[in-house]
Amino acid sequence: MKKLLIVFALFLSINSFAQVNSAQTVSVWQAKEYSKDISLFRAKYFLFNRVLGVSEDIKTFELIPLAASSSGELTTLFYKSEDFKKEGLILGFYGNYWNDAGVIYQGYSFKNLTKEEAIEFMDKISTSIGDNSKFMGKNSDNNNIYFKYKDIDVLVYYSGTGAIIRLFWNGFDSTWDGLAFDRSKRRFEKKLK
């Protein structure tokens, strides 16, 4: 009886302190919506503090989430300020980190691309995929292309669902699935008109 009680107590303690992968408890849709909502909230400060500049005068700007990757690691946002005559694209990068105590927390950072840089960046990705689709399609997941755009390293390959774009920037490794990329590009171009 004592042995059975010890085994039961041991089993109970193991289950009580087990870590659960939080990514498994969140659906793809929830991750995308969370990413868009939290990006909109956090990017407002980034935009007026780092891109437009803090002012004692009242200034205005628009900030609109375009699309979030299904992984929740990357969100794109369109911005426009008539007061500063600026518009562009903000890339919101997210990743999970662990501290020394084993506590998981989410790190994030934003990358600003001016209107011209955003157009050039997304066109380069589109052109690269189009020009190399035959090569990547020959051996999905194994045939890759890559290039650098300013300080962003870009890796592209095909999976069963289409093009996968991985962006490496500032310590982040974010997956931008082809559907989210296409949405971002299309919505960005629509906002520019």
Image (spheres, grey):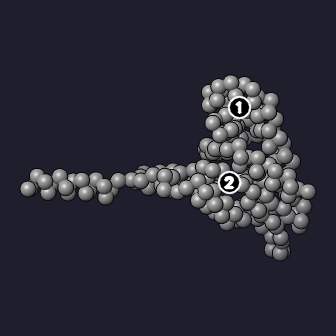
Crowding at dot 2, Cα within 10 Å, few <14 / some 14-19 / many 20+, comes out as many
Q: Is residue 132 above or below residue 53?
A: above
Residue at left 51%, top 52%?
A: 23
Q: Is residue 179 above or below residue 60?
A: above
Q: Nearer the viewer, mark 2 or mark 1?
A: 2
105 displayed left or right of 174: left
Residue type pointed to by label 2? Ala
Q: Name, please, the residue furthest toward the front.
A: 160
Residue type pointed to by label 1? Tyr
Query: Which quadrant does the N terminus fall into?
Result: bottom left
Q: What residue is disc 1 on?
A: 146
Q: Give the image location of residue 102, x and y in percent.
A: 41, 52
111 displayed left or right of 2: right
Residue at left 44%, top 55%?
A: 103
Query: What number is the disc on residue 68?
Result: 2
188 displayed left or right of 161: right
Residue at left 67%, top 33%?
A: 157
Instruction: Determine which quarter of the picture holds residue 192.
Output: bottom right
Crowding at dot 1, Cα within 10 Å, few <14 / some 14-19 / many 20+, comes out as some
Looking at the picture, tell me which residue is in the foreground, 180 or 19: 180
Is any part of residue 44 visible from this angle? yes
Query: Which quadrant does the C terminus fall into?
Result: bottom right
Q: Name, please, the residue furthest toward the left.
A: 1
Mark 2 vs mark 1, CA separation in Å: 22 Å
Please, what secondary structure does the residue beneath circle 2 have?
strand
Is any part of residue 73 visible from this angle? no
Q: Give the image location of residue 21, x and y in percent.
A: 45, 51
